[in-house]
Amino acid sequence: MTTFELGSATAKGGFSNEKAVCDKFNNWETDNEAQIWLKVMGYDTRQIDFVTAIHIPTRMKRTDVERLGLKESYEELMRFKKADAQLRIMITIGKIVKIENLSLKKANTDADYNQVDKRRVETYQEIWEFDDNVAFGLKLFTGEIDPTSHLEKIKNKMLRDKRRMFLDELPEDLRNKILNFFSENKILVVTDILKGRGGLSANWILVTRYNRKDDTTTWILKDINVAMNFFGFGNVRMSPRGSLYIGRITMQRKGGTPDPTKLQFKIKPCELFKLRK
């Protein structure tokens, strides 16, 4: 099977950052990896006239959005834009311009986690419309609500961490409401945290893994729907440490600084390389 058919390969040199990937697309006529990526995306490179790749930063100004000519409001785009860096690729074939948004994930050889979304519980409540009971349980989980001030409600005075509660420490009814919500709305949740919505949602995900020892980069490029099916595959269940698994996705309290009480979702990008087999 060819590299194009697999959508993955190992190449000489490092290109794990956004600028390097943009440069490769912008030099697509002479860059081997860029030509393979375009073929993976379904393009015949013999028919392409021009390719322009630009880096979409995590934080954008209104003027940046206006220059891209996107239809959604600034607020709407920022709410549903993916938090990780993206590339916006404009492919010109004749008079037709195709746009592909690519989400880039840099993976470590030890398969460390990579944050894919992080927000306050109330922001997720606005987006996903879960009820106040679920919100209350999640705020206890993140520590946004101090559990020691609600001991009469939660009936649990033996907390492992007095700053917050783990799912297995929540009252059973609250825990079940959270598990039920994420089970019933799994597709919505997985789509929003990996793909996003609107003009800056991701069409593709590119995972790169740089090996400093031999100066090579292993990469895999997959349609975002394939990635969502892969990372979202499996049950919604409580982890051994009292966080939440949504398939291969982990939901946990952010912790640390800044934003210690935000809710975050994480994946292990290296796991996507299993799709090479």
Image (spheres, rainbow, N blue to C red):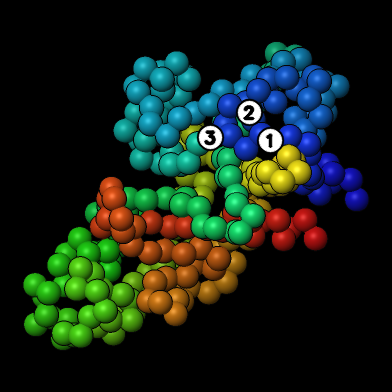
How many numbered tags mark residues here? 3
Residue positioned 37% across, 35% down in the render: 78
The residue at which mark 1 appears reads as 14
Q: Secondary structure at mark 1?
A: loop
Q: Which mark is residue 86?
A: 3
Find the residue positioned furthest to the front: 213
Q: Which mark is residue 20?
A: 2
Pointer 1 or 2: first along the chain = 1
Mark 3 is surrounded, within 10 Å at the Cα level, by few (under 14), some (14 to 19) or many (20 or more) other residues, namely: many
Label 3 vs label 2: CA separation? 13 Å
Mark 1 is surrounded, within 10 Å at the Cα level, by few (under 14), some (14 to 19) or many (20 or more) other residues, namely: some
Q: Secondary structure at mark 2?
A: helix
Three-letter amino acid code at disc 1?
Answer: Gly
Q: Secondary structure at mark 3?
A: strand
Residue positioned 33% across, 76% down in the render: 167
Residue positioned 57% across, 71% down in the render: 234
Query: Which residue is more in the foreground, 277 or 51?
Result: 277
Q: Is residue 105 left or right of residue 272?
A: left
